Every structure is written in C-alpha cells, then in structure tokens.
C-alpha cells in the first residue's frame, strides 16, 4: 500500500483537476465550454474503456467481449429505468454488478482458453449476448429497435438568471462530474493492481500460468478477479453512456467498435500501465477530433494511418517511447527485448 | 517427509511409471537416477502436480497431495526448480523471487515476503543482481534464480529437475554448494540428475529407475555396485534378454 | 417437420459454406504460414467486391469476367501491403499485429467510403442473378451454386498447391519451423510475401462473388473478418484442412435456423457464434 502512495497522490490531483475543470472552462470559454465538456466526457469515456480493458489484459486474457459488458451495463440501466421504482443513481452500481456477474460466468467457462482461442470465444459471447438481448420480449428490452433511456440529469432553466446555453452547460457539467468520478475510481483500481502484490500475480499469470501455480499463485482466482473488476467498471460506463446518449439499441450498444477502441487505445498508449491507457485516450481523442475538424470527410483514413504508423514506430506505445527517450538521455543502454509488450 | 506409494502413470497403453514406491526422510538429499526414458521427470511432474497419476498416492508430511493442484502443493510445502529454466522475463530478479515469496504461503504479509525474498536472494548468491531483468541472466544465474524462487516459497521439500544440465564443472560445483546450503537450512531435497559426480557428492540416498519402475535403492556406492544398475545403463544384448524371458 | 424445408436449409447452407471456406482459408494461410493476426483480411474481400462493382459500372464487365482483373489486382495489393507494413510486425506481440491490421482496416474501409459512399452498391448487369433450378422441391440459385463451385475449386486447388507443389511445401515448412526453413535455404520473406498476397487474392475473389449475391457496403469486410477468424479458430490453428468442415458446420447451422425457426434469419449471427463458443469451450474441457 505504501508503494501506491505517489500514484494515489497523482490520482487525487487528477480528481481535483476534474472537479475544477468545468468552472475554469466556463470562465475561459463561455458558450464554447459546452462542447469542450462534451469532448472531455468522450475522452474520459475512452480512458475508462481503455483502463478497464488493460486491467484484464494484464492477466494475459485478451478479451474481445468488452462491448458485451458495456452493453450489459447499458441495458441494465435502460431496463431498470423502464421498470421504474429505483432512482437512476442506483442504476450505475447495479450495472456494475451485472457486469461482474456476467464476467464471473464467462470467465469461469473460458479459463482454459488461451490467446486467440480466448479472444474468439469472447467475441462469440458478445454476438450471442447481442442476439439474446434482441430477442428478449419487446416490452422489456425493446427488441431490435432498442429502448429510450431517461437522462440522468434534467437541468432547469431559470429565465432571466441564465442564458440559454447554460442549460446545456449544466447538463454537460453534471455528466462530466459523474464521468470524472468513474474515471477516478477506475484509475484507483488500476493503480492498486499495479502497486500491490496483485501486480506480481497478474504478471506471473500472464507470463506463464503453470510456473505461477508452482509458486503458489492460483491462476483461476487471479484471472477471474481481473475479469470481474474490468467488467464491473466497463458495465458502469455502459450505463452512464446509455443515460447520456438517451437510448440503447442492440446493434449500436453491443457494437464491435467499442471493443476495438478498448483494445487499440491501451496498445497505443502503453500496455500494462495506468498512464498508458489514459495518455492513449487523450491523444487519440485529440487526434480524432483534430482530423475531423480539418478534413470532414474521410478523416478516419488519417486516423487509421496514425494507428498504423504508431505501431511501426512506437511498438511499446507512448509510454514505451517515453521510457526509451528517458533512457537515452540518461545514457543507460536500452532494455532487453523481454520487456513489457506494446 | 515425502512418501510415494504405488505410483503409476499411463499414457494410453504405455506405462511411463508403474509400481513406484519410496520414502524420503526429512532433511535428506535424495537422488533419482536412471537411463533416459526411465520415467524420472514424469515422476517429478506427478509429485509437483503438473501431471496427475493414474494410480498411487503421494504424501507430503503426512498430507495426501495426490490430486492437489500445483498452487495447493506449493502451499503445503513443495517447491520446484525446473529443468528448462523459466524465469518471468518481464520482471527483474527481485520481482521474480517476490512472486514466490508473496504467494508461496497463504497469509504472508508484504513485509514477511520481503524478508523471505531477501533471504532467498542471499542464499542463492543473487543479491548483487536483484535489479537485473531476468532475461539478461547467464545460465548459471538463471538456475540460481530458479532455486531462489523456489526457496522464497518457504518449502519443506525442494524438487530439483536436472539443474546441473548445461553447467561447466566449476559452475556445477557452485550449484552443489548451493544445494548443500539449502539442506542445512532444513529443507529436504529430491533431485533428478544425470551428472554422476554430482549425485555422488550430494546424495544421501539414491533411487535408480528403469522403464518406469524402481530398480535399486541405497547409497551411491551401493547402487553403482549393483550389477542390475550397471546393466540398465550399459544395456544388454537383446538375445540375452529373450533367453531369460 | 417439413422435410422439404429441412432439405432446403441444408442445401442453402452447404452452398453458403463455400464462400465462408474461401475467405477463411486465405486467413488461415496468413495466420498459419506467416503468423500474422490479420484483422484487415475482410477488407480484401470488400475491395474485391467494389472492384467488381466498379468494373461493371465503368466498363460494363460481367463480374465473372472481371475476376480476371480483380484477382491479380488483389494479389498486387496484398503484396504491397505486406511489403510496406505487415513484414515489420511479424516478430511483434500479437496485440501489436492486431493494432496494425485494425489500422489498415480503418484506412481501407474509409477509403472505400470516400470513393463509393456508404450506400449498398448493387451490380446491375447480371442477367443470370435470378436464374434458379428446382430439384425435387428445393430451389437452388445459379449464383449461389456457382459461387459454391468456384469457392470449392479454389479451396481444393489451394490444398493441392500446399500438398504437391514446391511452393506449397515451402509454405508448410516455413509454417512449422521458420528458423529451420531459412537454414535450409528457403527465402522466408519471399514465401511470406506470396502467402499473404495469395490470402488477399482468395478473399478478393470471394468479394467478387458476394457482390453478385448481395449489395455490398464498405463495412461488409469486417463482419467477414470476424467470421473468418471464428472459422479458422474452430478448425484449429494450423489446420487448413479442417476449414472445410468448420465452414460447413457453421454455414449449415446458420441456414437451418434461418429456414426452420420463425424469425430465424435475425438469429443467423447468433447461431454462428453460439456454435463457435460451444465448440471452443467444450474442446478446452476435453484437453484438460
């Protein structure tokens, strides 16, 4: 725990930044801050997606089911809202629980699967789950057309005391705080996994399960723990997004692209670290936004080129690049190739 | 301390090990030798939990571990160093050893684990190399790491699988010292070896296996004088065997 | 149960299996011989489809004829992509390969989107599209039948190449032991290049056929990539022969559910992946 202190302090600092950001942005940019807050929420969403995926990847489980838990969380919120009775705020933790339970199930069944076999099994799970949700009674889950989800916040307009854009600002600000809160929670989990004895267990299991077991590590427990934590977090994200977007629909909510972003971002930023997924999310969001504003049509081509170039020139991600540069400045020889991948 | 009863391992129709029984006393250094294919590594794999016996019983300090998982066996006091060294390449020497120290025994606090790791590093002479990434070690250093990792799990019995393989004579002598030191701390050692001088220097008792069965046991002098053992290693004419059958 | 319906489902499934096998076998080649997890594989399929479309629109070429141009074009495209990007990540961790090929996939998909737009493009001058035969109450379309025959022929041709030709043997050698292969003088990089280009070519031909059967959009590739991966994994990595069986299993199951179960068509994907999931999980338990 003591070793986690520096990282915990950084996280505290980040939390403070998150708490102050909306006010600062509003003061500096007035109406433009509305869209900035929205963009920031998108970036935070990507960071949570990336951090939670990375957490699971640390145990060697390369999951293509991230969208499944995201969707499960989203639909939990949607269905609970439809059934009524619970204040919306409860939907978030419940979505996390649903994600965790689902992960326990999927994780147990896939324990013996490795590498691409595991990946494809999890992908298959996602597709099946999507179909199951689609085939649920329309009265419950909306079928192929999906459901509307009530928003988490209904800002109220006080004419005379507020300008019109401040409605949107209030709404975005409120979402920003909740997103920020979930981000801080996710970072905390990620940091704890890096700075406590869990890191030894995760890395050992990822590297060589058999040898890890001979040393007394229980691979099954470690893998399931990572799966449960990762899925609970992304399930909560799914619920949050559902409420912000206002709807869930099988094809969109369970889209493979969610999983793709979840895995591309940590690789780009630096795998098996906490900083990597966060940096990756920030940079990739910025890159995408910049490209979109510059090129309008076809900007994703540039995005794809960035990804291709990044892996050719930064095989260990942004964090790896930073480490390499730092080592060069210190004059120490570059580390051997056995080091952290991505 | 370690007791094996009627152990058998069949792969399909082939019995790699059969009717194997022996006992190892606490604090002994016990060697298992035999020609290639005698079933030595299979036996070790069954004791350490990587293979499940098709028949028989394995007991560690009176506790039945025949079907226990690898992690469980480790917690019960069984440590193992592999023949083909498998360090965790992404970690430093220190971190490698810490895995064993933290998880070798349930309920270990971080502080206690640190102490055990320190001890293991010192005993295996890896103290100066602790921050080196495991992937940069020489062969002898890797073998030391294997043993250090196993020691960090606080074992009562240490299984060593041909640790001398690939070592030069000078290095082998250092390894022998290392193993002796381990026993002096009260750890029972069971090892497989092909390098006979090592067996002669280290072993208190020797078990010879052939074709998956026990052939002879006793002190090194006794078994090497046994004509059956000599035959097993040198082989006999096929005709002679058929005559006797 | 209506036996005719059952038979129809079976037949349709078998016919569809051909295309699945064709696309999957190319991917199996990439994964097995080169060792590259290629998430852009489906894009070669998509490019084939759109090249066929474009040739039909610009030159009025019948898709069958356009194969003559599309096949070599895809071979070259595959080779270029290999030389410029793929060969640099062969030794890299799987995740890096995935990132690279995802990136390629995004580039190619969006390139196609920019050129052709997002709407489905149908090839219009295919007079034989609606031709079909009735065999004992079962209808067999000429186009599905034709694509099945072509696909099967190509897959078998690939099997033959792998088993009987020097190139094929070289590919198998490299797949099994890269270092050993180079030690005996095989030019490993050139073999990789050919294998990759071939995988692109096979996928591209599949794309031409899908362009006739359906109206493709630029995003059609990725769905096929995922299915191809699933089939390759189902057959077992390195088991190229198993691809035919795996394709048949999933295609027939898909088709049976679509035909026999009410509203089954919407469940096609689910059935496909449910089978994959079950087989993978059950197989893992058995090897424990």
Image (cartoon, rainbow, N blue to C red):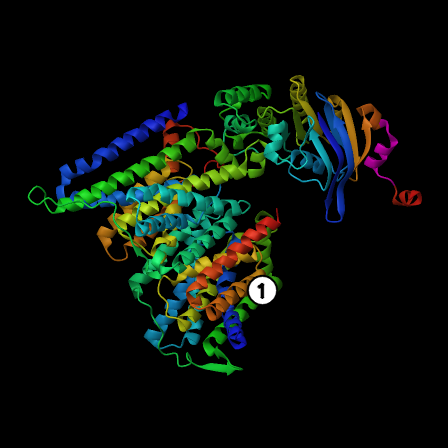
The residue shown at (68%, 37%) is B46
Q: Quadrant of the C terminus of chain A?
A: top left
The answer to whether residue C196 of the structure is visible from this angle is no
Q: Choose top left, top right, bottom left or bottom right for residue A43.
A: top left
- Callout count: 1
Badge 1 marks a residue whose secondary structure is helix
Please provide percent x and percent y for residue B228: 86, 33
Q: Nearer the viewer, residue A145 or C13?
A: A145
- Residue C233 sits inside the magenta stretch: no
User: In this picture, which residue range is highlighted in magenta?
Assistant: B225-236
| Looking at the image, residue B34 lies above or below residue A138 | above
- Quadrant in the picture for the N terminus of chain A: top left
Q: Splitting the image into 4 quarters, where does residue A181 fall?
A: top left
Q: Is residue A3 left or right of residue B192?
A: left
Residue B231 is one of the magenta-drawn residues: yes
Residue furthest to the front in view is A85
Give me the chain letter of mark 1. Answer: C
Q: Which residue is mark 1?
A: C159
Q: Is residue B114 left or right of residue A66?
A: right
Q: Which secondary structure type mostly characterizes the magenta part of the structure? A: helix
Camera-side residue of A69 and C149: A69
Q: Residue at horizontal 49%, vertical 68%?
A: C255
The percent coordinates of residue C63 (x first, y second) are 41, 74
Res A279 → quadrant:
top left
Identity of the residue drawn at 55% across and 29% down: B137
Give the side of residue C264 with respect to residue C109, left or right. Answer: right
Question: Residue reaching furthest right?
Answer: B243
Q: Nearer the viewer, residue C67 or A112?
A: A112
Residue pushed farthest left? A160
Task: Categorize mark 1 by other alpha carbons within 10 Å: few (<14), some (14-19), many (20+).
Answer: some
- Locate residue C1, reporting x and y percent: 53, 73
Q: Is residue C247 visible?
A: yes
């Amino acid at each position: 725990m003591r070793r986690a202190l520096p990282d915990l302090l950084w996280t505290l600092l980040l939390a403070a930044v998150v708490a102050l950001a909306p006010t600062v942005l509003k003061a500096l940019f007035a109406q433009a801050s509305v869209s900035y807050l929205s963009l920031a929420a998108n970036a935070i969403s990507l960071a949570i997606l990336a951090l939670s995926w990375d957490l699971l990847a640390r145990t060697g489980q390369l999951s293509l089911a991230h969208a499944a838990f995201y969707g499960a969380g989203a639909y939990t919120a949607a269905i609970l809202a439809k059934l009524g009775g619970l204040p919306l705020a409860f939907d978030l933790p419940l979505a996390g629980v649903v994600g965790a339970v689902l992960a326990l199930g999927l994780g147990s069944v896939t324990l013996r699967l490795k590498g691409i076999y595991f990946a494809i099994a999890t992908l298959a799970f996602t597709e099946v789950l999507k179909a199951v949700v689609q085939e649920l009674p329309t009265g419950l889950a909306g079928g192929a057309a999906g459901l509307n989800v009530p928003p988490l916040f209904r800002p109220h307009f006080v004419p005379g005391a507020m300008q019109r854009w401040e409605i949107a600002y209030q709404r975005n600000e409120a979402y920003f705080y909740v997103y920020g809160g979930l981000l801080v929670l996710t970072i905390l989990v990620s940091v704890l996994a890096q700075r406590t004895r869990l890191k030894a267990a995760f890395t050992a299991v990822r590297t060589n399960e058999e040898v890890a077991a001979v040393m007394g590590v229980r691979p099954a427990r470690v893998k399931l723990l990572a799966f449960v934590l990762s899925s609970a977090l992304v399930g909560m994200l799914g619920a949050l997004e559902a409420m912000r977007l206002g709807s869930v629909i099988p094809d969109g909510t369970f889209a493979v692209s969610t999983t793709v972003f979840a895995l591309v971002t940590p690789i780009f930023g630096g795998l098996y670290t906490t900083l990597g997924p966060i940096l990756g999310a920030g940079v990739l969001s910025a890159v995408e936004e910049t490209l979109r504003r510059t090129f309008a049509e076809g900007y994703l081509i540039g995005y794809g080129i960035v990804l291709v170039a990044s892996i050719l020139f930064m095989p260990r991600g942004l964090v790896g690049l930073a480490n390499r540069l730092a080592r060069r400045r210190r004059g120490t020889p570059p580390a051997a190739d056995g080091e952290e991948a991505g | 301390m370690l007791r094996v009863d009627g152990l058998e391992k069949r792969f399909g129709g082939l019995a790699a090990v059969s009717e194997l029984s022996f006992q190892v006393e606490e604090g002994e250094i016990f060697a298992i030798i035999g020609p290639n294919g005698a079933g030595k590594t299979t036996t070790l794999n069954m004791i350490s939990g990587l293979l499940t016996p098709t028949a028989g019983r394995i007991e560690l300090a009176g506790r039945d571990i025949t079907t226990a998982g690898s992690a469980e066996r480790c917690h019960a006091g069984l440590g193992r160093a592999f023949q083909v060294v498998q360090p965790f390449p992404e970690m430093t020497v220190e971190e490698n050893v810490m895995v064993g120290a933290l998880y070798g025994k349930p309920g270990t606090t971080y502080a206690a684990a640190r102490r055990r790791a320190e001890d293991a590093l010192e005993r295996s002479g890896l103290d100066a190399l602790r921050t080196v990434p495991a992937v940069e070690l020489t062969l002898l250093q890797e073998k030391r790491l294997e043993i250090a990792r196993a020691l960090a799990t606080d074992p009562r019995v240490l299984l060593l699988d041909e640790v001398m393989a690939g070592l030069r004579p000078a290095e082998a002598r250092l390894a022998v010292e290392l193993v002796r030191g381990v026993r002096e701390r009260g750890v029972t050692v069971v090892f497989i070896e092909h390098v006979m001088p090592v067996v002669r220097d280290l072993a208190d008792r020797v078990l010879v296996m052939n074709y998956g069965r026990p052939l002879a046991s006793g002190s090194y002098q006794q078994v090497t004088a046994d004509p059956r053992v000599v035959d097993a290693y040198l082989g006999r004419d096929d005709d002679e065997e058929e005559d006797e059958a | 149960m209506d036996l005719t319906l059952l038979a129809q489902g079976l037949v349709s499934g078998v016919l569809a299996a051909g295309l699945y096998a064709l696309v999957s076998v190319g991917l199996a080649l990439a994964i097995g011989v080169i060792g590259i997890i290629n998430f852009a594989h489906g894009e070669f399929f998509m490019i084939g489809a759109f090249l066929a479309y474009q040739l039909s629109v610009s030159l009025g070429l019948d898709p069958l004829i356009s194969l003559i141009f599309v096949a070599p074009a895809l071979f070259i495209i595959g080779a270029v992509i290999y030389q410029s990007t793929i060969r640099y990540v062969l030794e890299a961790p799987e995740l890096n390969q995935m990132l690279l090929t995802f990136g390629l996939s995004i580039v190619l998909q969006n390139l196609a989107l920019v050129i052709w737009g997002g709407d489905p493009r149908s090839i219009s001058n295919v007079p034989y599209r609606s031709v079909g035969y009735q065999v004992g109450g079962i209808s067999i379309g000429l186009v599905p039948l034709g694509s099945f025959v072509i696909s099967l022929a190509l897959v078998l041709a690939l099997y033959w190449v792998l088993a009987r030709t020097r190139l094929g043997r070289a590919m198998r050698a490299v797949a099994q032991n890269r270092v050993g292969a180079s030690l005996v003088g095989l030019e490993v990089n050139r073999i990789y290049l050919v294998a990759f280009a071939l995988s692109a070519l096979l996928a591209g031909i599949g794309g031409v056929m899908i362009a006739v059967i359906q109206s493709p959009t630029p995003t059609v590739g990725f769905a096929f990539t995922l299915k191809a991966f699933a089939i390759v994994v189902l057959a077992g990595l390195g088991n190229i022969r198993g691809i035919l069986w795996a394709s048949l299993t999933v295609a027939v199951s898909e088709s049976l559910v679509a035909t026999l179960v009410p509203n089954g068509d919407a469940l096609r994907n689910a059935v496909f992946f449910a089978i994959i999931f079950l087989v993978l999980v059950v197989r893992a338990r058995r090897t424990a």
